[in-house]
Amino acid sequence: MSGRYGNLDYSRAVKTGVIGGALLVVLGFLGEEAGHLLFGDLTGLLNTTFTALEFGGVIVGMIAVFIFGIALPLTE
C-alpha cells in the first residue's frame, strides 16, 4: 500500500543520508591531512573547502535523521 509520500523506504533513506554525511566528513578530513602532508601549507580556499566538507557532512547526517527518521514517519 502506498503511503502519503509514495513508497519511500525511510530506513534506507536515513542510512544513505548518514553514510553520505560520514563520507563527506572523512573526505574533508583526509583531504586536509593529505594536503598538509603533500604540499605543506594549503591556501585559505582549500582549508575553507575541506572544513566546509566536514561541517556539511555533519549537517547532512543530522538532517537525514531528523527528516527521514523522525518527521516524515510521524506525518505518514
Image (spheres, rainbow, N blue to C red):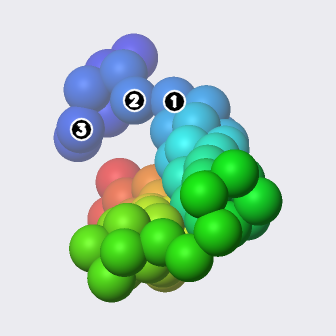
Is residue 35 positioned above or below 47 on the image?
A: above
Closer-to-camera residue (37/26) = 37
Disc 2 to disc 1: CB gap under 8 Å: yes
Q: Which residue is mark 3?
A: 5
Q: Position of residue 69 (x, y in %)?
A: 56, 61
Secondary structure of residue under mark 1 = loop
Q: Which residue is mark 1?
A: 9
Secondary structure of residue under mark 3 = loop
State the quadrant of the N terminus: top left
Residue 36 seen in the current view? yes
Mark 2 residue type = Leu
Q: Which residue is mark 2?
A: 8
Q: Position of residue 40 (x, y in %)?
A: 64, 69
Secondary structure of residue under mark 2 = loop
Q: Position of residue 33 (x, y in %)?
A: 73, 64
Q: Is residue 38 left or right of residue 8?
A: right
Mark 1 residue type = Asp
Is residue 44 positioned above or below 69 on the image?
A: below
Residue at point 39%, 29% (across, down) = 8
Q: Residues within 10 Å of mark 1 (few under 14, many from 20)?
A: few
